[in-house]
Amino acid sequence: MCPDSSQIKGLNRKDLLGISDLDRTEIELILNTAISLKEILERPIKVVPYLRGKTAAFLFFEPSTRTLHSFSLAARRLSCDFVSVSASTSSVLKGETLLDTAKNLEAMKLNFVVVRHSSPGAPHNLARNLRASIINAGDGCHEHPTQALLDLLTIREHFGRFNGLKIAIVGDIEHSRVARSNIYGMSKLGMDVSICGPPTLIPRDIEKMGVKVYYDLKKAIEDKDIIYVLRIQKERQSKGLFPSTREYIKLYSITEDILEKYAKEDVIIMHPGPVNRGLEISVSVADSSRSLILPQVTNGVAVRMACFYLLPGGEGGGKSVRRRA
Amino acid sequence: MNKLYKNARVIIDKDDIKKILDKLTDEIYNRNKNVEKLLIIGIKRRGELFARRIVESLSAKLNVLFGSLDITLYRDDLTSIDKKPIVRKTEIPFNIDDQNLLLIDDVLFTGRTVRAALTELVDFGRPKRVQLAVFIDRGERELPICPDFIGKSMKVDKSEMVEVKLQEIDEEECVLIVPK
C-alpha cells in the first residue's frame, strides 16, 4: 500500500481539553476516525494491537460509571494498558495535589491521562505540566468533549448531516458541561441550537454562544429535529434552583403526551445518561424507538478510541521514517 | 500530469495496466477454478480497487465475494511516523473460517504491509488457505513473504517509490516511478 500525502493528517494537538478549541475539520476528523474504528466492535476478536505497550491513567475525582467504563473499553480495544485512580482510593486523601498525583504517574511512564475533576480547568493545568496527552472527561461545569463528540457521531449516523438540523437542549443548562460542549460543537457544524429550562438554570449571557433561549418547553420543541434531554443533576441541586421536582416534571419533563401534542412526528430523543426515569424524561419516551440513548453509548466507545488513536500519547514527535511495503 | 511530482516517470500506462490485470485475473482463475468459493480481499486503498476489478471480471464464472482491509492499526512503524495516517474501515462482511482467501495489493516491496494484513485477518477467523496476488513486485523484501500471483516484476532502486494511480481515486491511470 502506498499511503498518499492526503492520508497523513493529524489532530495536531497534544491534548483534548474542550470542543471550544477544535475547528470543524478537527471535529470531522475525530468523527470519521470513530466511524472506521467502530467496525472493530463488531469483530469476533474485538481488539487491535495499535496501542500495545502504551499506558493510560484514568483519574476520576467525581463519580462516573458510564464514562469510566467507556474509556476503559476504548483503551482495551486498542490494546492500551491502563490504571484507574479514584479520589476515594488515591493519595489525594493523604493531601497530595492533583498535579503531584499526575506527575507521579507520569514518572511511571504514562502516555495518556484521562481526567474528570470538579474544578473547571483542572485538565488544562495537567496539560501544561505533563508530557502525556490529557483527555478531559469532564471538568466541573465547563466541558465534557468526548460526550459531545459521541452525541455528534450519533446525530451524523442518524441524519447523515449536521447543516440546518434543529435541536433543543432541555434542562439544567447552568450546571451542564455536556450542554456547553455540545453547544460549541453543534454550532461549529452548522446546527441550529436552542436551549430550554427554568430561568434559574439558564446561565446569564448564554445567547452570546449563539443559541436561542426558551423557558416554555412547548414552544422550544415545536419545530425541532432533536430534543436533547439533560439529566437533572441532583448532586448539584442543593441550592434549590427549582421549587420542586413535581413542578419540574410538570413544566419540563419530556413525555409521550408533550411530544404528541407539540413536537415533530419524527423527532429524535437523546440523553447523556444516567437517566432519571420519570423525572426529566418519561419511562416510555426513554424506551421508545425515537430514543437514541443506547446508540449514544456504543458511539461513546468509538469516539474515545478515536481520541486515543489521534492524540500523540506522550511520546509524540519522533523521527518521521515512512517504511513502504 | 502529476504536477505534484518532480522527475516522475511513467513506467506502465493505462492500456498496459489493463493487459497486466487481465493476465493476472486469468492466472487467478486458472488456479482457483475448482474452488467452491473464493473470498477476494483487497488492501486499502489501491489493492482494494484492483480487488474490486478482479471480482467484477471473475464473478460471471466463479463464486467470489469481496472484502477490504485497512492495515493502519497493525503497522509496525507507527511510532516513527509524525502524523497519524487516516484510518479507513475494514470491511469483511462474511465469515472467513475454513474459506479460500485471496489477498490483493498494488505494490509488494518490503512485505510489511502483507505481514500486517495477515495479522489482521487472523483476528477474523482461521481461513483454510490464503493466497497473495500483487500487481507489481518491486523486490527488496525485508520479511519472508512470497506472492502466488504477480502482475509485473521489476527491479526498482530503494531510493525510488512506485506509485500506482487508479481512475477511481486518482483520476488518472498509470504506474509511476518517483524519486524520494
Image (tube, rainbow, N blue to C red):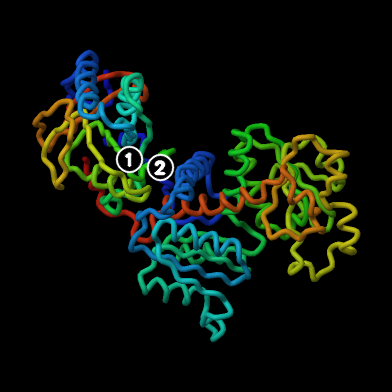
User: The disc labelled 2 sits on which kind of residue?
Assistant: Asn
Q: Which element type, helix, strand or loop, lies under badge 2?
A: loop
Residue at the top extreme of this rendering: B15
Binning the other alpha carbons within 10 Å of mark 1 as few (below 14), some (14 to 19) or many (20 upward) gives some
| In the rendered image, the vertical position of residue A79 relative to residue B34, given as above or below | below
Q: Is residue A24 left or right of residue A277?
A: left
User: The disc labelled 1 sits on which kind of residue?
Assistant: Gln
Binning the other alpha carbons within 10 Å of mark 2 as few (below 14), some (14 to 19) or many (20 upward) gives few
Q: Position of residue A3 (x, y in %)?
A: 30, 37
Q: Which chain carries label 2?
A: B
> Where's the N terminus of chain A, which quadrant?
top left
Q: Residue at x 15, y 47 (%)?
A: B143
> Where's the C terminus of chain A, which quadrant?
top left
- The answer to which quarter of the image holds residue B94 is top left
Residue A226: which numbered mark, if any? none
What residue does disc 2 label? B95
Distance Cα–Cα, label 2 vs label 1: 8 Å
Residue B112 seen anywhere in this rendered image of the structure? yes
Q: In this view, does A189 lie to the left or right of B40?
A: right
Foreground residue among A316 and B63: B63
Q: Which residue is drawn at 67% across and 61% down?
A: A141
Q: Where is residue A131 in the image (x, y as percent from the top left)?
A: 39, 64
Q: Where is residue A259 in the image (x, y as percent from the top left)?
A: 83, 42
Foreground residue among B62 and B140: B62
Number of on-image labels: 2
Q: Position of residue B97 (x, y in %)?
A: 36, 45
Please say if the residues under marks 2 and 1 sit with CB atoms less than 8 Å apart.
Answer: yes
| In the rendered image, the vertical position of residue A300 relative to residue A65, given as above or below | above
Q: Which chain carries label 1?
A: B
Residue B99: which numbered mark, if any? 1
Q: Which element type, helix, strand or loop, lies under badge 1?
A: loop
